[in-house]
């Protein structure tokens, strides 16, 4: 994943923007609220929401900082930015705005934000530590950061992930494996955050049951976010076969009401821009 792939990633999210987080699954918006609880925004604060997408973090953050505060959302997907800008206008919000901008090297002044939030974006950056350094740079001294990442995959769903593996080119598989090392544990990611200059790094992990009405609902939903990348690696003439293989993997996981439930582990990492470098603290 080189710097050149940033635009490809943004284009991928352009294609997801219409249905992103809008298919009746408690996912990004639910996790955004938990992130905001941990960062504990207060009225009047100036917030940067990096990789804002459709505003899962931005809208509740704007509510929490109130009219005396502000939230700027940045994203490299023009479709995400256009749709979220329209929603801001429709809601007549005066304390929220969005801008088309790269998350890794945002063109923003040093030391201007009280809080930087980045929910499920850091792992898309070609150089995640460079992104973290930028977020540290734009924070005021004493400012706070809150970063959300995914934890370990649900082992019950391993068969679904296996279905896509033959279509992942070797170079991409290698890149994903190298990057996985950075996000392998709370400790490894905490060290990366510290290496970007942050102090008082603290992480907590939670696992949520994410419910889909039936296996087909998961398939539809999986086209609406980053998983779409794996669908788009499948040649058109093999899509039906892959779809059938996924359904076969999910069939045995059905609950009595026909639904399937994914155990999704999410990690919330908070940190400060301070003078002292503290050891990463990992909560249970
Ligand atoms: C999984 S979505 C998360 C969106 C939102 N934070 C949420 O929690 O719903 C990832 C977002 O990061 C954006 N993104 C990916 N790479 C980016 C980059 N280099 N710069 C800015 N945004 C980027 C995508 O366009 C997408 O909107």
Image (cartoon, helix red, strand yellow):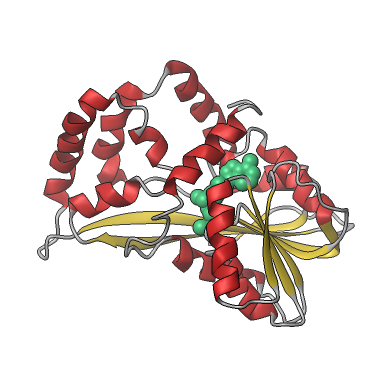
In this orientation, which residue lies closer to the viewer: 51 or 173? 51
Q: Residue furthest top?
A: 170
Q: Relative to 155, does residue 175 appear above or below in the rendering?
A: above
Q: Which quadrant of the figure has residue 82?
A: bottom right
Q: Residue at x 73, y 66 (%)?
A: 47
Q: Is residue 17 above or below residue 180?
A: below
Along the viewing direction, whichever of 12 and 176 lies nearer the viewer: 12
Q: Nearer the viewer, residue 84 or 135?
A: 84
Instruction: Return the x and y of residue 156 as percentages of the image width and height.
Output: 25, 46
Q: What residue is rendered at 66% in x and 39% in y?
A: 128
Residue drawn at x 31%, y 22% is: 166
Q: Tell me where residue 234 appears, x and y as whole percent.
A: 31, 27
**Residue 85 x/y as whole percent:** 60, 62
**In the image, is 80 to the left or to the right of 99?**
left
The image quarter containing residue 226 is: top left
Q: Position of residue 191 (x, y in %)?
A: 69, 44
Q: How many marks?
A: 0
Q: Nearer the viewer, residue 131 or 190?
A: 131
**Is residue 152 visible to the viewer in this orientation of the structure?**
yes
In this picture, residue 109 sits left or right of residue 70 = right
In the current view of this chain or complex, which residue is farthest to the left? 256
Q: Quadrant of the N terminus?
A: top right
């Amino acid at each position: 994943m080189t710097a050149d792939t940033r635009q490809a990633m943004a284009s991928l999210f352009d294609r997801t923007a219409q249905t992103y987080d809008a298919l009746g699954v408690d996912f990004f918006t639910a996790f955004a609220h938990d992130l905001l609880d941990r960062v504990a925004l207060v009225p009047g604060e100036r917030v940067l929401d990096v990789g804002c997408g459709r505003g899962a973090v931005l809208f509740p953050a704007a509510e929490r900082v109130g009219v005396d505060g502000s939230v700027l959302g940045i994203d490299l997907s023009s479709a995400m930015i256009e749709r979220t800008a329209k929603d801001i206008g429709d809601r007549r919000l005066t304390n929220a705005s969005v801008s088309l901008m790269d998350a890794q090297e945002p063109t923003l002044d040093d030391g201007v934000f009280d809080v930087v939030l980045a929910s499920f974006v850091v792992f898309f950056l070609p150089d995640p530590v460079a992104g973290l350094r930028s977020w540290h740079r734009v924070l005021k001294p004493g400012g706070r950061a809150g970063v959300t990442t995914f934890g370990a995959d649900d082992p019950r769903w391993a068969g679904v992930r296996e279905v896509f593996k033959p279509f992942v080119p070797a170079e991409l598989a290698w890149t994903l494996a190298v990057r996985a090392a950075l996000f392998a544990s709370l400790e490894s990611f905490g060290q990366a955050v510290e290496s970007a200059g942050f102090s008082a790094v603290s992480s907590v992990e939670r696992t949520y049951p994410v419910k889909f009405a039936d296996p087909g609902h998961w398939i539809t939903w999986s086209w609406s976010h980053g998983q779409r990348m794996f669908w788009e690696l499948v040649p058109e003439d093999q899509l039906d076969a892959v779809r059938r293989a996924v359904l076969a993997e999910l069939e045995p996981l059905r609950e009595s009401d026909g639904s399937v439930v994914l155990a999704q582990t999410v990690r919330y990492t908070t940190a400060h821009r301070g003078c002292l470098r503290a050891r990463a603290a990992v909560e249970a």
